[in-house]
Amino acid sequence: MLQVNRISKRFGHTLILDQVSLHMKAGEKAALVGANGSGKSTLFQIITGDLKPDSGSIIRSKGERLGYLPQNPAALKAENVGQALLGEHWLPVKNRRLQSKEEGRALATLAALGLPQLSLNQSIAALSGGELTRVHLSALLLAQPQVLLLDEPTNHLDIRALEWLEQEIKHYRGTILLISHDRVFLDRTIEAVFELDDISHKIEKHIGDYSGYAEQKKREQEKAYAVWKDQQAEIRRLTADWKTTAEQARWSENQTKDSKMRRYAKKVARKGLAKKKRLERYLESEERIEKPLERWRLRINFDENSHRSQRVLQTEDLSFHYPGRPLFQNLNLQILDGERIALIGPNGSGKSTLLKVLLGQLTPSAGSFQWGPSVKPGYLAQKQDDLPPEQNALEILGAVKAAPLNEIHHFLHYFLLDETQVRLPASLLSFGQRARLMLARIVAQGANFLVLDEPVNHLDIPSREQFELALQAFSGGLLLVAHDRAFISRVCTQTWELQETEIRKGYAADLIPEHRPV
């Protein structure tokens, strides 16, 4: 059981949570959704006790253990992987070792989450951020706390690991509250959605999976817009009625000196005044709603320079390997005009390396590749490491787009970069802000073929959906690395799965068979 009672939190003058309440029964599985910056991670930190609220309380069943996977976990308090998997954060027994049965399950869990290469003696200090997150997640699943909070557990998982984790959560006996931007993952794991609104700073509960919640929100928005249109029509009618009556009274009074007619004109004027007051009361009534507006989300309009190449890319026996470790061998691939391909496969299989080879950033070990003569690729790197750290967004865009400063400023506004953010050095921007800035630069450069490495990693669901619409409107082709199956199925038609040095071709629709059109 988990109860969040009337929690409020401010950071300085900024209100993050306002009298937020959330109740979950034992064994319930739900998602906490909301725009980036709405306070989801803040609420998790308050539930765990890592952050104190300004007011309100958290109630859990007595003796109940709580497990928490933060979005960017700090180093675990352990020297090696085996100690980390003991879960001493949740288990009271200190300085013990994993038993043989526990070792087998621990190694199987690590392998399922894409870490088959790790040994229990592996030093924690040598792990990357993604590996550390997956070790932390493995420890939680092994410890089986009664309440589990997962903040973006899918960020570093490939598709097979995602499918494995979906089954683990589905059969988990405890209570789970998770934050995720993966819509397929949410549909397959949860039974309720808690929406944290970034305007009201309050929570509303919706029963069902994420798709049901999204469809309900869409219907509510359409209904609100229809009500608003009816209200606007009524306002126009009342305004016209009042003005017509008032004008009629003024005209009648000015056209005669007859006292009887003038008394009639004043009567009409009083009638017009009553209609005006009726209009004012209508405008001030609580039932009247403001125009439903689209939230300020990512809006992209690709300024395309079309190419004339029927064959966009051709490879011949393309290979790349590190000493003693081949990533791909003898690849004979081609991309034709307008094709949209998702490059998928296990973490570490070489997907990002293949993109870099095709873009000329790495030299192939053998073989060759050739782009069409008029193809201009635009590349979005996964690590966001090619932005000049000391330059701000205005300077970065100004270097690739010849336009007045105010036009560049307006252009960046469409990518959710506000007045303050466009003047900050790139090194001080968040991951999501840097991702949007890199997208803006690609658009400004006029690319006619897109090469995207995990382009939606740091975007919330509404922004992912806007990005999908933009890519659907883009007439050029694309080659992308992604693990978001909903995103892939909406913008790609084919998949190239890189596994064991080879490419296996498939269809994007097969990633979500339950959503495949009949």
Image (cartoon, rainbow, N blue to C red):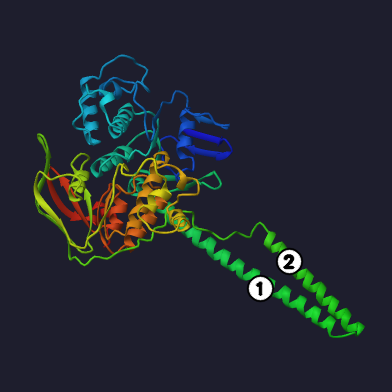
Residue 169 disc label:
none
Q: Residue at x 60, y 59 (%)?
A: 289
Name the spot of residue 397 as percent of width and height, x first. 38, 52
Quarter of the picture containing the C terminus is: bottom left
Position of 142 with respect to 32 (left or right) is: left
Q: Amino acid at mark 1?
A: Arg
- SS under mark 2: helix
Judge whether residue 97 can be spotted in this image.
Answer: yes
Among numbered discs 1 and 2, the one appearing first in the sequence: 1
Q: Position of residue 201 (x, y in %)?
A: 54, 43
**Label pair 1/2, CB-CB below 8 angstroms:** no
The answer to which quarter of the image holds residue 70 is top left
How crowded is the residue under tag 2: few (<14 C-alpha within 10 Å), some, or many (20+)? some
Residue denoted by label 1: 237
Q: What's the distance in space between the residues labelled 1 and 2, CA to CA?
A: 12 Å
**Tag shown at residue 278:** 2
Regarding residue 195, the answer to whether it shows in the image is no
Residue at left offset 47%, top offset 24%: 62
- Identified at 37% across, 17% down, the residue is 92
Task: Give the residue type that dot 2 points to.
Answer: Arg
The local crowd at label 1, few if under 14, some if 14 to 19, many if 20 or more residues have their Cα within 10 Å, is: few
Q: Nearer the viewer, residue 224 or 359?
A: 359
Give the residue drawn at x 47%, y 43%.
Answer: 37
Q: Is residue 456 above or below residue 27?
A: below
Relative horizontal placement of residue 254, taking residue 376 as reference (left or right) = right
Q: Position of residue 198 (x, y in %)?
A: 51, 46
Residue at disc 1, secondary structure: helix
